[in-house]
Amino acid sequence: MPSWSSSTNEPLLITILGPTATGKTALAAEVAYRLNGEVISADSRQVFRGMDIGTGKDLADYDIHGTHVPYHLIDICHPSEEYSAYRFLNDFVPAFSSIVARGRQPILCGGTGLYIDAVVRRYRLSDAPIDPAYRASLEPFSDDELAARLASYGPLHNHTDTETRERLLRALEIQEYAQAHPDRYTHLPDMHHAVFGTLMDRQHVIDRIEHRLRTRLDEGMTDEVQRLLDQGIAPERLMRFGLEYRHVTKFLLHQCTREEMYRDLFTDIRRFAKRQMTWFRRMERAGVNIHWLDATMPVELLAEQLIVTLKKTTI
């Protein structure tokens, strides 16, 4: 085990979060190398096989200083499968427990705020099936009435649940099922948390997004999406993955020019980074203590700073 322990003697989970293009993976790998650790990915798209360039898996980052840092929850399902926060928590638990059982340090790393928040703030989620009869019973109610009913169950974890009627119906369906099946909730093991964030000023993030987007296009991101289409993944399914997969698919279907694809994708990634920071700031307002790090520093210095802070806050 690491040379420090929490005052509660619970296993320690180090979490590294941050907006896209701020070097989270490289930092997590460097910290894992130094602390005999393993990385658990918290990325809602990196779970899918064959989606490598567009999701920024950066698997080469896990080979560091001549050592391979083990990683988990990457390439675990087919792009045609549905993946959810409920499924993520159920995949996270055995990964976390196995790392701890082997005396190694678990490190959660990613930019999917919902997944990270679900672990750090211990969401209780259920695997509610689609219930047509229940949905039909809600048809007479307005969206405002459905939102009020949803609010009656307690504070919302995911505020996007009220953005569309479909999301409202699904959220209510989940709550109703959970009330009737309390044994079908997710259950997280006890753990102590140390949460770190990679932070850059807005212009640094924009510059890195632009550089990474050009690099990914040069590395064959368009060819990757074409291969997925050739393998039978429906265009509508690919577009649901958003960002790179939405805009590249539209380009391959001749719905936009290459220039329009690049322009719109660049704009959407910038907006996505802003939404990520909004989620992380909301976590802070909910009581999560995030130690923000200057991600413009070299990764080796950044890792040193993280470990120094970690020892001060967990011993």
Image (cartoon, rainbow, N blue to C red):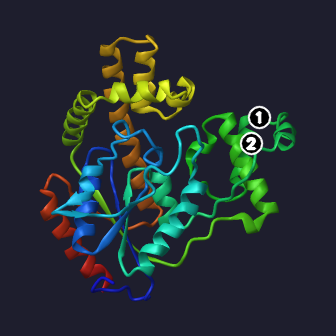
Quadrant position of residue 209:
top left
Marks 2 and 1, how far apart in space?
A: 6 Å
In the visual, does 44 lie left or right of 165?
left
Q: Position of residue 259 (x, y in %)?
A: 30, 14
Q: Is residue 258 above or below residue 218?
A: above
Regarding mark 1 in the picture, which secondary structure is present there? Answer: loop
How dense is the environment of label 2, judged by Cα within 10 Å: few (below 14), some, or many (20 and up)? many
The foreground one among 102 and 191 is 102
Q: Which mark is residue 270?
A: none
Q: Which mark is residue 142?
A: 1
* Residue drawn at point x = 58 percent, y = 49 percent: 84
- Mark 2 belongs to which amino acid? Leu
Q: Position of residue 202 (x, y in %)?
A: 24, 41
Q: Is residue 301 above or below residue 58?
A: below
Residue picked out by circle 2? 146
Query: Which quadrant of the rendered structure holds the C terminus?
Result: bottom left
* Residue drawn at point x = 49 percent, y = 35 percent: 241
- Mark 1 belongs to which amino acid? Ser
In the visual, does 209 lie left or right of 11?
left
Q: Position of residue 161 (x, y in %)?
A: 62, 44
Q: Position of residue 299 (x, y in %)?
A: 16, 58
The foreground one among 245 and 51 is 51
**Are dots 2 and 1 in contact, CB under 8 Å?**
yes
The foreground one among 220 and 242 is 220
Regarding mark 2 in the picture, which secondary structure is present there? Answer: helix
